[in-house]
Image (tube, helix red, strand yellow):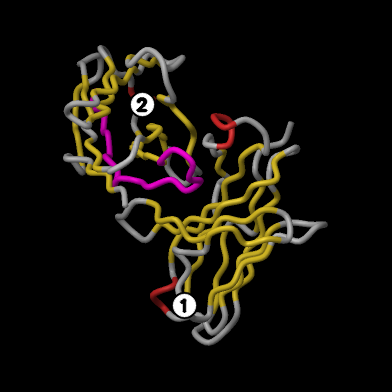
Amino acid sequence: NAGVMQNPRHLVRRRGQEARLRCSPMKGHSHVYWYRQLPEEGLKFMVYLQKENIIDESGMPKERFSAEFPKEGPSILRIQQVVRGDSAAYFCASSPSTGVAAKNIQYFGAGTRLSVL
Amino acid sequence: AQSVTQLDSQVPVFEEAPVELRCNYSSSVSVYLFWYVQYPNQGLQLLLKYLSGSTLVESINGFEAEFNKSQTSFHLRKPSVHISDTAEYFCAVTPFGAQKLVFGQGTRLTINP
């Protein structure tokens, strides 16, 4: 049973370009979460999605950031017109859809490290 | 809202010595508690969790943590560390009924031979 898959592992963009980060949840998981880890800091929640729905986007910056989790395919975190301050590690996590306790256990991918030049 | 404080940003210890990584949280509602470990250039792995029941929880590699509701703490301990325990450790909480994890700032555990 493959874990949470994120790609690419490393992404380099110049200021003003777009960054697209992909996340495939564990098999059988229908809940996806995105977190951002800035250098020397802990992880900060960005957004929580279920298939075709954004459930909680309270941690998403108001501009340039968007996320989706379509019916088919991976979840995508999209950052438009990147700036140097977007340089960070972006982690995706997933959890199963049944069971109150199970839903609170999140399994993390290896992350995408975004560098903005 | 919830917050998590990890009091030590770095903890250096000698191999085979005991270690305690401290975690305190603040929340107006009940929470589930977690410790995650992050090895260099890797993602987070769940180390142990407290959902309900016994307040002392253990991991398969010798770590344990005790939930203390009155002190709002969930400190992580290991009686004898190994070089392979070198990593960053994150304490996290999620309130009942919510789906997002709130993380502490992390504690970098360094094991010296």
Could you say where residue A73 lies in the image, as x and y percent from the top left?
79, 57
Q: Position of residue B76 (x, y in %)?
A: 28, 25
Q: Chain of mark 1?
A: A
**Hey, which quadrant is residue A96 in on the image?**
top right
Q: Which residue occupies 42% across, 21% down? A: B52
- Check disc 1: other Cα within 10 Å, few if <14, some if 14-19, many if 20+: few
User: Outermost residue, bottom direction?
Assistant: A16
Which amino acid type is shown beneath numbered disc 1?
Lys
Secondary element under disc 1, as helix, strand or loop, is: loop
Q: Which residues are magenta?
A: B95-113
Is B102 contained in the magenta span?
yes
> Is A11 rendered above or below residue B23?
below
Which residue appears at 35% of the width and 46% of the height?
Answer: B103
- B29 to the left or right of B49: left
Name which residue type carries label 2: Asp
Nearest-to-viewer mark from 1 and 2? 1
Residue at 57% x, 38% y is A107
- Disc sitting over residue A62 in the figure: 1
Q: Quadrant of the N terminus of chain A?
A: top right
Residue at (31, 52) in percent of width and height: B1
- Residue denoted by label 2: B85
- Residue at disc 2, secondary structure: helix
Q: Is residue B11 left or right of residue B98?
A: left
The answer for which chain carries disc 2 is B
Q: Is residue A105 above or below residue A65?
A: above
